[in-house]
Amino acid sequence: MIEIKKQSLSETFSIYFDKRMLKILLLGSISGFPWVLIGSSLSLWLKEDGLSRSTIGWAGLIFGVYAFNYLWAPLVDRIQIPFLTKKIGHRRAWIVLMQLIILASLVLWSLINPTENLALVITVGLLIAIASATQDITVDALRIEQIGENEGKSMAAGAAMAVVGWWSGYKLGGVIALFSAEHFQMLGFENYWQITFLILGILIILMNIGLMFIGEQNSEERKVKQALNDKIISEKLGNKNIFSNLMTWIGGTLGGPIISFFKKNGFSIAIGILGFVFLFKVGEAFLGRMSIIFYKEIGFSKSDIAIYSKTLGWITTVIFTLLGGLFVIRSGVLKAMFLAGIIMACTNLLFSVLAWSDKSELLFAIAVIFDDIAAAFATVAFVAFISLLVDRAYTATQYALLASIGTAGRTTLASSSGALVDWLNGNWGLFFILTALMVIPSLIILWLMKNKLKLSEK
């Protein structure tokens, strides 16, 4: 049963002025930035080097790593990084290590020609994806742990700020990438994308400096809860020896979070939640994966894409994510997700209109604005939804599990987006209609289980 306690609009909005929200904003930016690298930047880099739409689409399979990061989330929860953990804390140590891997990967990209070493380019992209997906495990846990377990409204506000931060990292990183690439291209540099990757590396260094201002909560309580679960498993195994101790650790680390999730929700509702999470953003992902290729093919320049899709889109996203957060706080996460699903389907149809019209900057701007409004509402509701579901004893693992399943639908299925456009003989209008229909199954699942979800928003 979902209980919502109403409060004035000013009281609701004041939650955003909590100093913890600024820290969550930075964490979101750290999480969103790598998607610029393996998303729009990599896609356009490959496109301008003459590779096909299908190749670019299949290259997107590297995003599939995000769908499986829950597999090693328990290790991130427990294993300490030598030297770094003692110096800067468990969560921050993992983030810094992954940022260093991403930075090294950008330096390597700056030395590669994709037409000659496509396999190496994709391999480095995969390395970035693995580091980014691993980083997200810790970022999300650190973000949730900034908020008290009983602060439901602050959690919703934190979800909104995390989304604003994610899109800020993604959009502003994209603006810098596109303008830098076009600037160096106009100056006559043939390796303009390689130079751009080095510039993007500077942003990573700045983000790590900011990370040092985010504190960590005491992890003793989490360790105590995990130890209790380990003890239960150990008692069931009987005799203590090296083998039983190993099985206890594996059972508590891997099995504990999953058992806890199914026990809390019941088997049928738990399966329903997983199905909804998997399908909710599939249509949006199909559109997003091919959008920059679509913009390029209908005649928009990199500067046009930077202004309308990145800069304008970022401003729209920030505004409507904050408004979406207020909607979630006042009306509930489920209503927000139903509304977001309907808006997502409708806005995808705007891209069909754009595809069937002559090149129009006005239509381009309208489509981008409404697409970002839908994405803002959908993402903040989604993040708040799964944040409220996690058990604090397994923050990183359970959130990673739910987020990974959501990413699985967006990445594994959407990797065929380029092939679908080719199969439709480049009929972009029909492609966007199909993406609009993809949200319907998830909304049906949500409707069927809406009265049985064990959610409490106070």
Image (cartoon, rainbow, N blue to C red):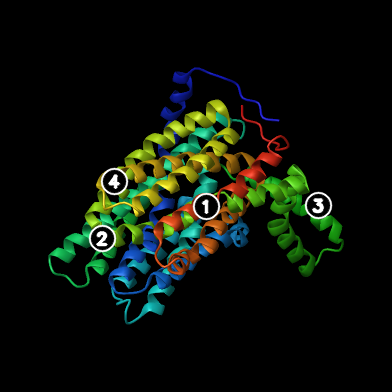
Local packing at callout 4 (Cα closer than 10 Å; few below 14, some 14-19, many 20+) is many
For this rendering, which residue is in front, 29 or 163? 163
The Cα atoms of the two marked residues, 1 and 2, are separated by 25 Å
The first of marks 1 and 2 along the sequence is 1
Q: Which mark is residue 199?
A: 2
Outermost residue on the top side: it is 8
Look at the numbered disc 2 and give the secondary structure of its residue: helix
The Cα atoms of the two marked residues, 4 and 1, are separated by 28 Å
User: Does the CB distance between marks 3 and 4 fall below 8 Å?
Assistant: no
Q: Residue at x 73, y 37 (%)?
A: 452
x%, y% of residue 113?
29, 77
The first of marks 4 and 1 along the sequence is 1
Q: Residue at x 71, y 30 (%)?
A: 1
The first of marks 2 and 4 along the sequence is 2
Q: Which residue is mark 3?
A: 232
Res. 130 in view: no
The Cα atoms of the two marked residues, 2 and 4, are separated by 18 Å
